[in-house]
Image: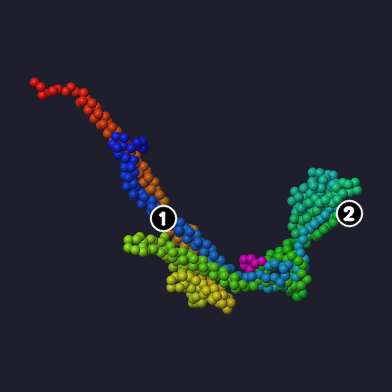
Amino acid sequence: MGIALDGLVSGLKTSELIDALMDVQAIPRNLMSAKSDDKKFIITQLQTLNTSLQDLAAKAKKAASGESIAQLSAASSSEAVKVALRSGASAVTADIVVDRLAQKHTVVTAASTQWPDSPPTLILENAAGERVEVTADSSSMADIARAINKAGAGISATVVSAGTDADGNPLQRLQLIATESGADGSFRVLRANGDDVATAPGAAVVATGSDAQVRLWAGTAAEQVITSSKNTFTDLFTGVDVTVSAVSTEPVTVSAAADDAASTKAAAEFIKQVASLLTRIDNGSKATVGATAGETTTLGVFTGDSTIRALRQSLADAIQHPIDGTSPSSIGISIDRYGVLTIDETKFAAALADDPTAVTTMFTGIAERVQQTTETYSDKYDGLLTARITGQQSEVDSLGKQLERWDLRLEQRRATLERTYARMETMLSQMQSQSSYLTSQLSSLPSYDTGSK
């Protein structure tokens, strides 16, 4: 409800009066809203921190397994042999001889104007002797190819132009290629009478499906022949895949060797991620004191938060406490008196080169403690930081309900004030009318001259 025109009778600016009164009435509500906004901001910062903590937990788990620091580099003595490393790869060096490459079975049919049989029925037979019978819609080479492709028998058919016959009619062939390389991809295509299309005059088996083959330790009593339907030998060694692209007459040396530079870089990235998290906590916990008397002191979003303070201390302890009696500073990982975490990569690399086993044990031990700490705080079900976020969110939800009730009360109060001032204007109008009426009545009364006798 609102007043259309302010103070028609009283001359008061009633809208401004009501707004001023409502501003006073809304002070508790505004303070509560500001409190809710502050808590929402805190929740956002806590959630961001928790996300970073969860990411660190995943990195720490990987580092604790030794995967981060056990960096390897792959090498091959021939461009025709490529080495790829996967998770779980171990250091290895070996010579291989590439005897042959995998190839797809390929057949080209004799040139003809159309398929010689009607109805155009074919029998597709795979390497295991399994057969699929197909019948094309017509004897055209295009329909024959379409029928073979639809059969799903592992054969791809393509129509290829083959010139013209003596009468000038266009000739065509079918090129039939196995969809998969290797011996298991071999096939036969038979006519309805049982004849193999590859044996017809002018037809040919262009390539016989065969597996790729390599030999380990060639020429020794331990020589081992390994085949693959593809040119990639998966897990030729544990976690090591080898892809060949050419036959070799001489042995090719393939290797997966420790890469100290990559290991140092991986360790440094992990420690720097922890350092970045500690710095974020420190920055969020600072209180900025006013430069002059009377200026407001600004608190950080994490200032006074015991959960965050405990998290910070736990992470620092996980990094700096000794492992089996040896300080992490011995491999270049340290926290100074200001709480700043750093890693001396030169010192770490030297320690790794001198005693890789000891450094690996030290680093994985640190990572394991970091993993335990991060999971304790960031677990999505019962993590300490997760519980802190949930608690803050509960307070925001409660404040939200209180604000809804405040909004309703304020709306009702404004309506009451508007009705009150509207009634006041009405009453003043009535009184003004009565006053005018009485004035007019009094002025109409006869006058008597009381001074004459």
**Residue drawn where x is 53% and y is 72% of the image:** 363
Report the residue at 57% width, 69% height from top.
266
- Quarter of the rendering occupied by the C terminus: top left
Q: Nearer the viewer, mark 2 or mark 1?
A: 1
Direction from residue 250 to residue 394 in the image, left or right? left
Check the image and name the residue furthest to the left.
453
Instruction: Identify residue type, mark 2.
Output: Pro
**Residue occupied by mark 2:** 201
The picture places residue 287, in percent across and down from the top left corner, at: 39, 63
Most foreground residue, 66 or 28: 28
Amino acid at the residue labelled 1: Lys
Look at the image and tell me whether residue 112 can be seen: no
Q: Quadrant of residue 231?
A: bottom right
Looking at the rendering, the stretch of residues picked out in magenta corresponds to: 84-89
Which of 127/248 is in front?
248
Does the magenta portion include 87? yes
Which residue does the numbered mark 1 point to in the structure image?
A: 39
Marks 2 & 1, CB-CB < 8 Å contact: no
Residue lying furthest top in this view?
453
Q: Nearer the viewer, residue 365 or 331?
A: 331
Q: What separation in Å lies between label 2 and label 1 (alpha carbons)?
A: 86 Å
Q: Residues within 10 Å of mark 1 (few under 14, many from 20)?
A: some
Q: Residues within 10 Å of mark 2 (few under 14, many from 20)?
A: few
